[in-house]
Amino acid sequence: MKTAPNRFSLFKTSALLTSMIAVAAPQASQAIDDFEFPPISYSDTKPNDRITQLQTDTQSGKLKFTQKTEKDFVGALLKELNIPASSQALVFSKTSLQTSAINPGQPRAIYFNEEVYFGWTRNRDLELMAAEPKLGVTFYLIHRDPKSSKLSYEQHTDECFSCHASGRTGGRPGMVVRSVLADAKGFPIFSAGSYTTDQSSPIAQRWGGWYVTGHHGELRHMGNAIAIEVDKGNGAEIDREAGANMDELDEFIDPTDYLVPDSDIVALMVLEHQVGMHNRLIEGNYVVRKAVYRDQEISRELGENRKGFSDTTKRIIDHQAERILNYLLFANEVKLTGGGLDSDSTFVEDFQHNAKVSKDGRSLKDFQLLSRIFKYRCSYMIYSSSFASLPKPLKNKVYRRLGDVLTGKDTSNEYAYLKESERKRILNILVETLPDAPASWKKGEQAKQVTVK
């Protein structure tokens, strides 16, 4: 992998998955380059993530990809990364720097699991984002020589950061899912506005510039629709009805060009939830590490021998813990109406292949899909490396607050939507499947197997 001592001299390459990944709350006071200074030191920190592991294995010869076609190679690489092909989401808007290769007839394919986001634009380098314990997220290009099948890797940042470390991500490396009104060539009509979307976004604002397969009843989205500009510079219109409840995409693309024929609505919903969770975990990681570092520096400068954190740092930890907890428990999730969601994709089954299952067969990956995405409203991302690598004071606070909610100690209205039966089931799942579940959750009433009918 090519690297450089700081990001200002890194490669001038295409931005990564610009329309892809979700939003963290902006902090106007945060300079975009804050993460280049201690304690983050983004460009000076050597990453250790799934892509660096892949690079080691391919360059040592331990792992080889000899597939003849680009499509077969992409399928093999996804399999190696444990990313299901059924997670495929197709975006046709020209919202990355690979605009010349993307259009409604040749959309970009995006695939994901809990650790890696994978972008494939045909006949172009692959674009990947990987969860990284210290850096939050890292950005890569993978080039495959079609003659030799040799892979070359580039870690890159500068042009990625134009969107992936902007106001949409709180000024730190993160992820963005965008919904735009795209014209017949795929160009966004920005005078019509755009949306960054996550689990709280109304369905009516989602998936503009994306293809969507699956059934959603009376709900209407912006997908599968070409926008027509109205009174140039004054907005655009789309036909939502024409793009609703579609089983196939044959009228738009040749589905045999892709690994699966779908751009599944359930996969899209999960993608938006997951990247929103990732962004909040990244924010918590960065903000709390910076606060603790500053607290320690000030204490050192003043010659203090203070134990614990300042009140300011404690408030920062508390605030970030509440933001994570709120999203973790789907507090702001949009309600599904009109019959819920359904599709013929294998995504639901494939997504659950690595589910952490309790003794009674329940998991946080169980779907509901009638009024909400999941049956048990606690994110499966609690098992992710991004959650596991949260600063200890922050992680402990999240666990403490999560325990308050699930045991009923927290009686506030904020989490009143979680009925007692759901709280108990979530707690039982976590006690049995979360390796570092706090011991306090396992004592007394918290340790009992709760049967709720």
Image: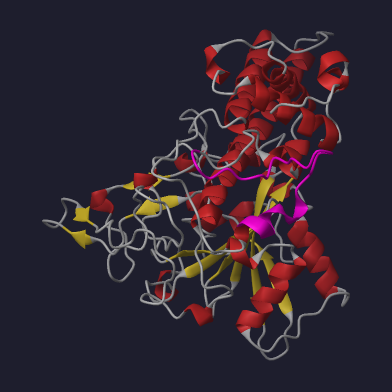
Residue at (49% x, 42% y) in the render: 198
On the image, the x and y values in percent for residue 431 come to 82, 29
Q: Magenta segment, which residues?
A: 348-371
Answer whether residue 354 is magenta in the image.
Answer: yes
Q: How many labels sit on residues?
A: 0
Locate the C terminus by quadrant.
Answer: top right
Residue at (76% x, 41% y) in the render: 383
Locate the N terminus by quadrant.
Answer: bottom right
Q: Quadrant of residue 416?
A: top right
Residue at (54% x, 17% y) in the render: 414
Would you say 280 lies left or right of 436 here? left
Would you say 158 lies left or right of 364 here? left
Up-down relation of residue 12 to residue 383 (above or below): below
Q: Give the camera-side residue of 140 and 296.
A: 140
Furthest residue toward front: 453
Up-down relation of residue 242 to residue 410 (above or below): below
Up-down relation of residue 56 to residue 429 (above or below): below
On the image, the x and y values in percent for residue 351 come to 67, 55
Q: Is residue 188 visible?
A: yes
Q: Is residue 12 visible?
A: no
Q: Give the camera-side residue of 219 and 130.
A: 219
Answer whether residue 310 is magenta in the image.
Answer: no
